[in-house]
Image: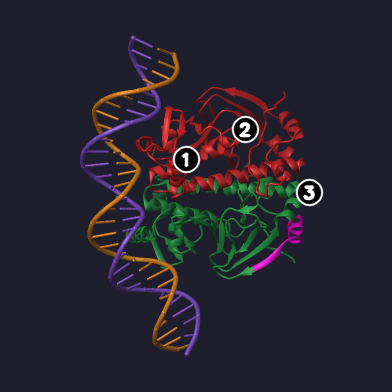
Chain colours: A green, B red, C purple, D orange
DNA sequence: CGGACTATTGAGACTCCTCAACTAACGTGG
DNA sequence: CCACGTTAGTTGAGGAGTCTCAATAGTCCG
C-alpha cells in the first residue's frame, strides 16, 4: 500500500517557522511507518465507522470526504461534536471506548489503524507523536471555537461562525482569495445539530441571509458569499 | 527543586488496565526531567498568567489552586473556555501566540516551563510525550462535554452539568462516595460566562434548585448536593 | 467601619422552540 | 426513463425561556 494521501492537518502551537510548517505535514518516513499499519477503506455516504461506547480498537485518518462525529442525547436530540475533513484524525476514546458515533456525510476514504499498533509506533517515533500532539491540540482549539459558536444567542451569529469554520477548512486546500464559494456537504439538520438550533431556525436563518443579499445558494450544498464583510461582521459580533 | 507535586491528570483513551492507569501519572523520572526545566510560581488570586495573543513562551502545570481560561469577546461579553484544576496543563497556543487569557481564581501554585525546552524534552522522551498526548485528548473530551452543556436551552440543565463537571474534578482527589459537598471557587459571574448565561440567570437557577431542595449553599463557595438523583436527572435530561 | 464588589429579585422585550402544514428534491424500482 | 415514495427543506402561529434594565440586599476587603 502506498497511502500517499496520509496527512495530518493542524496549525502548530509554535510560531510558524520553516520547522513549524513542517509539523503540519507528515514526512515520507512517517507515511511509510503509518501505511504499514493502516488499512484503506472506501465507504459510501452514511456509513457508520463506529458507535459510541463501542470498544475503541482503531484510529482513523481521513484522506477524502467529510465525516460527522455526534452523540444522541437522552432527549432524542442529536449533538454533533465536530465535522471532520481530509487530514483530520478521529477515534476519540475514553477508557477504551469510543466517545462519539462517527458517520460518513459523503463518500469517504479513510486509513484505519489499530490503536495498539499506533501507540507502539508513537512511543518509538517521538517525532511522529509530536505531529499527533499538534493535531489534538488543534482540535482542542476548534472545539473551543465551536463552544463559542453555540453560546451565541442569535441564529445568524451561529450560522455565520459555522461558515467561517467551513472557510478555515477550505483554506487548507484552496488558495486564499479564491472563489467565495464553499461546499456545504452536510444537511440543514446536521448544521442544526452542530449549532444547537432547530432545523427550522437554520432554514429561517439562511432565508434571511439570502434576502439580505449576504449569501446565495446555487444549490443546497453550495453557498456563495456575496457580502464577505457583512458576514464577518455578523460572525464577529459575539 | 523537588517539584514533587508535578502531576498530569487525565483519563487515558485506552482501556484502564494497570498500564492504563499509569498513563495518568508521571513517573519519578518524568518529574525529574520536568522539574529541571520548571520554575515554581506561587501567586495570589486574580493574577493573570498571560493574555491572549501574547507570545506563547511557556506552558504551565497546576500544582494547587484553580485557574480560568477565557476570551473577551468584541461585544464585551466574556467567554470562559475552561476552568483548570490541579494536575491540569495550560498554555494553549496557535502560531506561537496564546489563544486565551488565563487568570488565577484562587491562590495558585504552578510550574512554568519554557515551551522550547519542553518540546525538546518531549521529542527525546516519547513516554513523557504520551502523557501529554493523553492529557490534551482528555481536555478535548471535556471541551466537547462543555459544548453540550452550553447547547442546552434551560439554565437548570446547564447548571446541573456544571456541577457534574466539578464532581468529576473533585473525584480525582477525594474518594468516591465521599461527602456530597463541593467547593465552588468561582463566582456566579464566572459560572455565567462559562455556561453562556447572564449572572441573573445563574442566580435564579441556584435559588430555584435550593427551593426545590436539591442543593444547599452553606456559603457562596460551597454547595451541598441534597438530592443527587434529581440532580443527575436534570443533568442527563439533555 | 465604610466602600466596592457580588449576588439576588422583579418586569418587559426578544429569540428561538414546538407543532403543523406544505413544497421541493432525491433515489429507487419498475 | 418515469413515477412514486421517502427524505429534506421551507414557512407560519403560539408558547417557553432567557436577556436586559433596574433596584435591592448581602459580603468581603481594606
Residue holding disc 2: B60
**Which quarter of the image is occupied by the C terminus of chain A?**
top left
Asked if disc 2 and disc 1 are in contact, CB closer than 8 Å, the reply is no
Q: Which mark is residue A99?
A: none
Q: Observer-nearest residue: A102 or D1?
A: A102
In the image, C23 versus A21, the foreground residue is C23
User: Does the residue at mark 3 contact the one at mark 2 (Cβ under 8 Å)?
Assistant: no
How far from the left and from the top, in percent, is residue A106? 54, 67
Image marks 3 and 1: residues in contact by CB distance under 8 Å:
no
Give how far across and how far down residue B45 sits, in percent.
51, 24
Q: Which of the two discs, 2 and 1, labels the residue nearer the N terminus?
A: 2
User: Which residue is drawn at the image coordinates 75% and 30% (left, top)?
Assistant: B32
Q: Give percent across and percent down for residue B213.
A: 39, 36
Q: At 63% from the left edge and 53% from the top edge, which residue is drawn?
A: A97
Q: What residue span does the magenta drawing correspond to? A: A27-41
Q: Nearer the viewer, mark 3 or mark 1?
A: 1
Q: CA distance from mark 3 to mark 2?
A: 26 Å
SS at badge 2: strand
Q: Is residue A31 magenta?
A: yes
Instruction: Say which chain tag 2 marks.
Output: B
Circle 3 Cα neighbour tier, 10 Å, few/some/many (<14 / 14–19 / ≥20): some
Numbered-mark total: 3
CA gap between label 3 and label 1 equals 46 Å
Nearest to viewer (mark 2 / mark 1): 1
Residue position marked by numbered label 3 in the rendering: A124
Q: Which residue is mark 1?
A: B228
Q: Residues within 10 Å of mark 1 (few under 14, many from 20)?
A: few
Amino acid at each position: 500500500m502506498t497511502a500517499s494521501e496520509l496527512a495530518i492537518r493542524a496549525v502548530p502551537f509554535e510560531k510558524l517557522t520553516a520547522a513549524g510548517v513542517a509539523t503540519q505535514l507528515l514526512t515520507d518516513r512517517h507515511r511509510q511507518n503509518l501505511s504499514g499499519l493502516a488499512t484503506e477503506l472506501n465507504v459510501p455516504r452514511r456509513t457508520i465507522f463506529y458507535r459510541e461506547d463501542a470498544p475503541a480498537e482503531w484510529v482513523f485518518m481521513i484522506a477524502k470526504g467529510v465525516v460527522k462525529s455526534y452523540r444522541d442525547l437522552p432527549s432524542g436530540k442529536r449533538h454533533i461534536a465536530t465535522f471532520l475533513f481530509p487530514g483530520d484524525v478521529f477515534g476519540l476514546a475514553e477508557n477504551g471506548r469510543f466517545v462519539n458515533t462517527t458517520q460518513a456525510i459523503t463518500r469517504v476514504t479513510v486509513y484505519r489503524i489499530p490503536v495498539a499498533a499506533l501507540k507502539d509506533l508513537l512511543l518509538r517515533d517521538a517525532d511522529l507523536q509530536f505531529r499527533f500532539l499538534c493535531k489534538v491540540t488543534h482540535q482542542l482549539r476548534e472545539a473551543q471555537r465551536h463552544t463559542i459558536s453555540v453560546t451565541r444567542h442569535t441564529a445568524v451569529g451561529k450560522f455565520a461562525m459555522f461558515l467561517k469554520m467551513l472557510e478555515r477548512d477550505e483554506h487548507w486546500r484552496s488558495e486564499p482569495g479564491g472563489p467565495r464559494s464553499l461546499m456545504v456537504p452536510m444537511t440543514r439538520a446536521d448544521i442544526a445539530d452542530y449549532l444547537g438550533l432547530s432545523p427550522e431556525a437554520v432554514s429561517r436563518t439562511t432565508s434571511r441571509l439570502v434576502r439580505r443579499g449576504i449569501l446565495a445558494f446555487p444549490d443546497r450544498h453550495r453557498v456563495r458569499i456575496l457580502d464577505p464583510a457583512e458576514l464577518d461582521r455578523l460572525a464577529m459580533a459575539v
